Image (cartoon, helix red, strand yellow):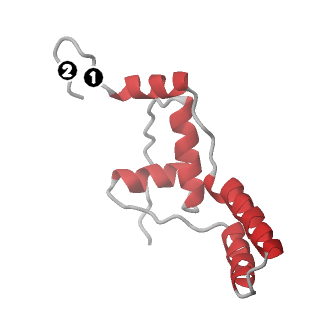
Amino acid sequence: MGSKKSKNGIFFEATEAQKRKIKKNAALCGMRQGEYILRRALGYEPKAVQPDAFYHFHKDLCDLLNKELTPKLEAAALKLFDEIYAELIDDHKQSVAEIREEVTQWQPPDYGPSSAD
């Protein structure tokens, strides 16, 4: 007989910004959120899986770079760079209020003794 795996739930609080970041990072690594959190907590550093768009952009960029440079080609390359940035690099920007809320969550108060968990 095989051994049965018992599952224990662990629950914790997270801000909306933290939840978004965990969800995004888990998706980038091709994992469920719980699996991602567990592996990170146990010291594993999962590698991000490149989205299909990365390979499409890479092919398009290679095709452009193998041609003679002309003003038309330069315009096409700049357009492609904008598309790459929008699809793969640009991310949700946090507002100042969201950043302040997130930072105050993990910074100890500047008065009194710090509490140990």
Amino acid type assigned to the residue bearing label 2 in the image: Ser
Residue at 80% x, 69% y is 76
Extreme-front residue of the structure: 71
82 vs 8: above or below: below
Residue 114's tag is 2
Residue at 73% x, 64% y is 78
Label 1 close to label 2 by CB (< 8 Å)? yes
Mark 1–mark 2 Cα distance, whole angstroms, equals 6 Å
Instruction: Answer with the quarter of the image where residue 28 lies.
Output: bottom right
Name the residue that disc number 1 marks: 108
Residue at 75% x, 66% y is 80
Mark 1: secondary structure: loop
Mark 2: secondary structure: loop
Extreme-top residue of the structure: 112
Q: Quadrant of the N terminus?
A: bottom left
Q: Position of residue 17 (x, y in %)?
A: 55, 34
Residue at 73% x, 74% y is 56
Extreme-right residue of the structure: 72
2 and 13: which is toward the camera:
13
39 and 73: which is toward the camera:
73
Residue 36's tag is none
Q: Position of residue 31 (x, y in %)?
A: 56, 59
Q: Residues within 10 Å of mark 1 (few under 14, many from 20)?
A: few
Q: Is residue 32 visible?
A: no
Q: Position of residue 51 (x, y in %)?
A: 66, 66
Q: Position of residue 18 (x, y in %)?
A: 50, 36
Query: Taking 49 as reference, is 103 left or right?
Result: left
- The earlier-in-sequence mark between 1 and 2 is 1
Amino acid type assigned to the residue bearing label 1 in the image: Pro
